[in-house]
Image (cartoon, rainbow, N blue to C red):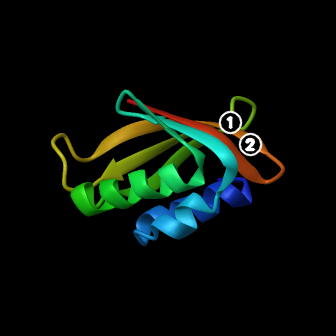
Amino acid sequence: MNLPNVIVDLTKAQNSFDSMAYANCFTENATVFDEGKNHNGKTEIQQWIKKANEEYQAVMKPVEYLAKEEVLKAEVSGNFPGSPIVLSYHFKLKDGLIESLKITG
């Protein structure tokens, strides 16, 4: 699967529970939408993923990438009901970083 470098980096950061490396994949003013909430800016994104990592210990395995739509489908498993589940990560990339991410089921 041919993934953009920043998505490879994001996956590595998620799977090693490195919230700082995860946040560094985003632009300064990026937004993440997950579980009905927006997280705005690198600091808020880092705090959100740190809390999620502690609570869910989720790891992701990319299964499909639709380059034209910038959508990654990944099998996510962890400490949460329904694990594992396939989630869709809808990206908007800018200058090699993630400008926005929306995670849907």
The part of the image, by quadrant, that contains residue 59 is: bottom left
Residue at 72%, 60% in the rendered image:
5
In front of the other: 56 or 32 = 32
Disc 2 versus disc 1: nearer the observer: 2
Residue at 19%, 48% in the rendered image:
80
Q: Position of residue 56 (x, y in %)?
A: 25, 55
Q: Report the Cα–Cα distance between label 2 and label 1.
A: 8 Å
Q: Position of residue 90 (x, y in %)?
A: 58, 34
Q: Is 61 displayed left or right of 6 in the figure?
A: left
Q: Secondary structure at mark 1?
A: loop
| Amino acid at pointer 2 | Leu
Q: Is 44 displayed left or right of 42 in the figure?
A: left
Q: Secondary structure at mark 2?
A: strand
- The residue pinned by badge 2 equals 93
In front of the other: 11 or 28 = 28
66 is higher (above) or lower (below) than 18: above
Local packing at callout 1 (Cα closer than 10 Å; few below 14, some 14-19, many 20+) is some
| Amino acid at pointer 1 | Glu
Residue at 53%, 56% in the rendered image:
43
Decide if residue 12 is in sight here: no
Q: Position of residue 47 (x, y in %)?
A: 42, 56
Q: Earlier in the sequence, mark 2 or mark 1?
A: 1
Decide if residue 86 is in sight here: yes
Instruction: Tell me the number on the disc at residue 70.
Output: 1
91 is higher (above) or lower (below) than 5: above
